């Protein structure tokens, strides 16, 4: 019971810390006169990946590399199977041209790259982490240029309200509170997850790819369901794919630069990563058939059922 409370408390702190960090980052970016579009594509994406980053860094430093890797793999699977699946069931999703030309190919590139890095020597080395970060920078430059060319609108909730009233003192307070919540949240979550794994006699990787991954996807799921239920613009496919790319490139990239991550649980490469690749790959045919520029309700049901089957196979 105590370990479950640790995990739940850790997740709550991670959600609060992520929210504080997003608000502080957006406020600071506006103070520095960075455009709304650039903030949406870079600052917010990075800030929303902060919980996964803190969990992975904490796990890798505390000798739990399976949690560090499967936190990202599981989060990417949950973002598509669980979050996107449920959102599409509530209401069909629109797909824009950028998905076909840039975001989906980039997601497949980063997903295959991380598989290649892990498969070659069973370790995510420091130089591979540097390559992932450089790849992310190139992707963001291309994405920003594409958004400017297509005049894409970037939607950030309450961004103008945040920018108009925020002071530097408040930004500093939010950064301190967000950083502290993320730090302690990651400590509680990793410690609790390790103890639960021991008590259930399952591997840390299993707990990480299910419980922790679903937990860190809860904010995206809540935002998507609320938006879909209100018949507002639901979270876009592009945003979820962007989150998955950030998870691979920034979370695993930065974690492996801080400390190299070995693969100690064989099912990561024999099973889990293939599920991640499969969920990423299936998005393209789903967005193309039966009609282009959309993911329908029945496709959402298929994604959700596939995710449920994945959880079943893990246990």
Image: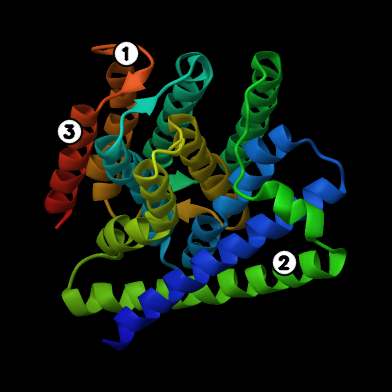
Q: Earlier in the sequence, mark 3 or mark 1?
A: 1
Q: Few, some or many C-alpha atoms within 10 Å of disc 2 (few <14, some 14-19, many ≥20)?
A: many
Q: Could you say which quadrant of the image residue 77 lies in?
A: top left
Q: What SS does tag 1 mark?
A: helix
Residue 17, percent across and down? Answer: 58, 67
The crowd level at tag 1 (other Cα within 10 Å; few <14, some 14-19, many 20+) is: some
Residue at left offset 44%, top offset 47%: 123
Q: Name the residue rendered at 71%, 68% in the picture.
A: 174
Quarter holding residue 303: top left
Q: Position of residue 139 (x, y in %)?
A: 62, 27
- Do the numbered discs 3 and 2 sit on residues whose CB atoms are within 8 Å? no
Q: Which residue is mark 1?
A: 288
From where the camera sits, is residue 307 visible? yes
**Which circle's residue, 3 or 2, is located before the other in the chain?**
2
Quadrant in which residue 117 is drawn:
top left
Give me the C-alpha separation between circle 3 and circle 2. 40 Å
State the residue in front, 166 or 26.
Answer: 166
Q: CA distance from mark 1 to mark 2?
A: 42 Å
The structure residue drawn at horizontal position 23% and vertical position 41%, both measured from the top left corner, is 270
Is there any visible trace of residue 61 in the rendered image? no
Residue extending furthest toward the bottom: 2
Nearer the observer, 198 or 6:
6
Q: Position of residue 267 (x, y in %)?
A: 24, 49
Q: Is residue 271 above or below residue 143?
A: below
* Residue furthest out toward the front: 230
- Indicate the secondary structure of the residue bearing disc 2: helix
Counting residues from the start of the chain, the first of labels 1 and 2 encountered is 2
Please state the horizontal and vertical placement of residue 226, each as a whole percent of the image: 39, 50
- Give the labeled residue for mark 2: 175
The quadrant in which the C terminus is found is bottom left
Proximity of marks 1 and 2: CB atoms separated by less than 8 Å: no
Which residue position is annotated with label 3? Answer: 302
């Amino acid at each position: 019971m105590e370990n479950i409370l640790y995990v739940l408390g850790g997740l709550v702190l991670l959600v609060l810390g992520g929210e504080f960090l997003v608000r502080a980052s957006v406020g600071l970016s506006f103070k520095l006169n960075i455009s709304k579009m650039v903030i949406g594509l870079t600052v917010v994406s990075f800030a929303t990946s902060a919980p996964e980053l803190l969990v992975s860094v904490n796990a890798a430093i505390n000798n739990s590399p399976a949690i560090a890797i499967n936190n990202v793999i599981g989060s990417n699977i949950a973002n598509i199977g669980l979050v996107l699946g449920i959102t599409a069931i509530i209401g069909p999703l629109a797909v824009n041209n950028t998905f076909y030309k840039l975001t989906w190919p980039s997601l497949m590139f980063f997903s295959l790259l991380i598989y290649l890095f892990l498969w070659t020597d069973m370790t995510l080395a420091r130089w591979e982490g540097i390559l992932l970060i450089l790849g992310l920078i190139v992707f963001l430059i291309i994405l920003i240029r594409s958004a400017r060319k297509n005049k894409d609108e970037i939607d950030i909730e309450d961004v103008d309200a945040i920018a108009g009233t925020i002071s530097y003192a408040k930004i500093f307070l939010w950064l301190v509170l967000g950083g502290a919540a993320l730090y302690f949240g990651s400590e509680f979550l990793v410690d609790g997850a390790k103890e639960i794994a021991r008590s259930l006699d399952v591997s840390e990787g299993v707990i990480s790819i299910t419980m922790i991954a679903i937990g860190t996807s809860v904010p995206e799921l809540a935002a998507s369901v609320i938006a879909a239920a209100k018949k507002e613009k639901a979270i876009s496919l592009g945003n979820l794919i962007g989150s998955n790319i950030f998870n691979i490139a920034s979370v695993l990239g930065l974690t492996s630069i801080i400390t190299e991550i070995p693969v100690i649980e064989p099912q990561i490469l024999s099973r889990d990563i293939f599920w991640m690749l499969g969920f990423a790959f299936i998005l393209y045919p789903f967005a193309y058939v039966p009609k282009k520029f959309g993911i329908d309700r029945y496709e959402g049901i298929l994604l959700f059922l596939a995710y449920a089957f994945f959880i079943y196979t893990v246990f």
